[in-house]
């Protein structure tokens, strides 16, 4: 019989998740993150995203179990047969977005986004944004509350709420979606090849300030934001066969 994987358990601050962590560690043992084979995250989608940001550099697979509402990135919580479930799990490879944001002060901030990079107006004034794709201007002026670039995994989150398209997980595409566009009224966004470099230039940024957010990492008063899919960094999420992420995204496209 092969050796069971070494599991490191992380939990959100919710009491239910903390209690689950204690029970799992009592049953499967306590393993430091540096020595584990798989990171088990107990919480919701928000906690899983924070876990990915904090620990993606460890190059370990992540297996999530929900505490609370069911999320797209989490499996159902069941206390039994965890090792067997992980052995049967299907891997999903996620490629994050790399954001490079330049502020009015001239500072450059870089961050990763596993869901989306979003730009939002900071004041009562609508934002004015120029959009370039691979160095070529595509939209000279978008007047809006904001705009976002989403990965396939994140396309069912904020992107869907902004009426953006749901992207199949293996489609090698990105969604470019306006948020409450005013002009041009008929522009509803675009589906881009995953290797597209998106540059968003903020027009009249002193009068119409804009912030940029990569998942939960925010930069205020930006003047230019560059977004592209990472080629070097990937993360592996493990899903129970009945909770396959690709199948859940497909189901969402036919939801009434």
Image (tube, grey):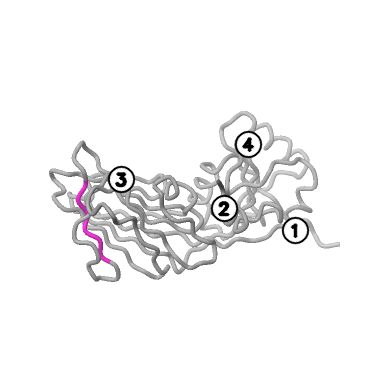
Check if mark 1's residue and mark 2's residue have beta carbons within 8 Å: no
Which element carries disc 3, helix, strand or loop? loop
| Mark 4 vs 3, N-terminal side | 4
Q: Nearer the viewer, mark 4 or mark 2?
A: 2
Q: Is residue 139 left or right of residue 60?
A: left
Residue 176: x and y, percent?
Answer: 36, 58
Q: Residue at x 31, y 63 (%)?
A: 198
Mark 4 vs mark 2, CA separation in Å: 26 Å
State yes or no: residue 101 in magenta: no
Check if mark 3's residue and mark 1's residue have beta carbons within 8 Å: no
The label on residue 67 is 4
Provide the residue designation for mark 1. Answer: 88
Which element carries disc 1, helix, strand or loop? helix
Residue 204: x and y, percent?
Answer: 13, 50
Provide the residue designation for mark 2. Answer: 254
Within 10 Å of disc 3 (Cα), the crowding (few <14, some 14-19, many 20+) is: some
| Mark 4 vs 1, N-terminal side | 4
The label on residue 223 is none
Mark 3 vs mark 2, CA separation in Å: 24 Å
Residue 48: x and y, percent?
Answer: 55, 46
Mark 4 vs mark 3, CA separation in Å: 33 Å
Q: Nearer the viewer, mark 3 or mark 1?
A: 3
Within 10 Å of disc 4 (Cα), the crowding (few <14, some 14-19, many 20+) is: many
Picture quarter with the N terminus: bottom right
Q: Is residue 67 above or below residue 255?
A: above
| Mark 1 vs 2, N-terminal side | 1
């Amino acid at each position: 019989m092969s050796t069971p994987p070494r599991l490191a358990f992380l939990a959100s601050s919710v009491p239910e998740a903390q209690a689950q962590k204690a029970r799992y560690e009592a049953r499967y043992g306590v393993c430091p993150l540096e020595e584990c084979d798989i990171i088990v995250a107990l919480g919701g989608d928000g906690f899983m995203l924070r876990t990915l940001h904090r620990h993606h550099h460890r190059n370990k697979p992540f297996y999530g179990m929900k505490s609370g509402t069911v999320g797209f990135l989490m499996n159902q919580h069941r206390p039994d047969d965890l090792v067997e479930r992980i052995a049967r799990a299907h891997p999903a490879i996620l490629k994050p977005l790399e954001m490079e944001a330049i502020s009015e002060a001239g500072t450059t901030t870089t961050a990763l986004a596993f869901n989306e990079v979003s730009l939002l107006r900071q004041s009562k004034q609508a934002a004015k944004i120029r959009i370039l794709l691979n160095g070529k201007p595509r939209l000279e002026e978008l007047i809006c509350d904001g705009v976002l670039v989403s990965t396939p995994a994140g396309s069912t989150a904020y992107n869907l709420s902004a009426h953006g398209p749901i992207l199949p997980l293996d489609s090698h595409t990105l969604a470019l979606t306006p948020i409450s566009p005013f002009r041009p009224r008929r522009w509803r966004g675009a589906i881009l090849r995953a290797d597209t470099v998106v540059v968003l230039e903020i027009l009249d940024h002193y009068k119409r300030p804009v912030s940029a957010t990569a998942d939960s990492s925010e930069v205020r008063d930006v003047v230019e934001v560059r977004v592209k899919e990472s080629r070097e960094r990937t993360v592996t999420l493990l899903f129970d066969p009945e909770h396959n992420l690709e199948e859940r995204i497909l189901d969402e496209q036919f939801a009434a």
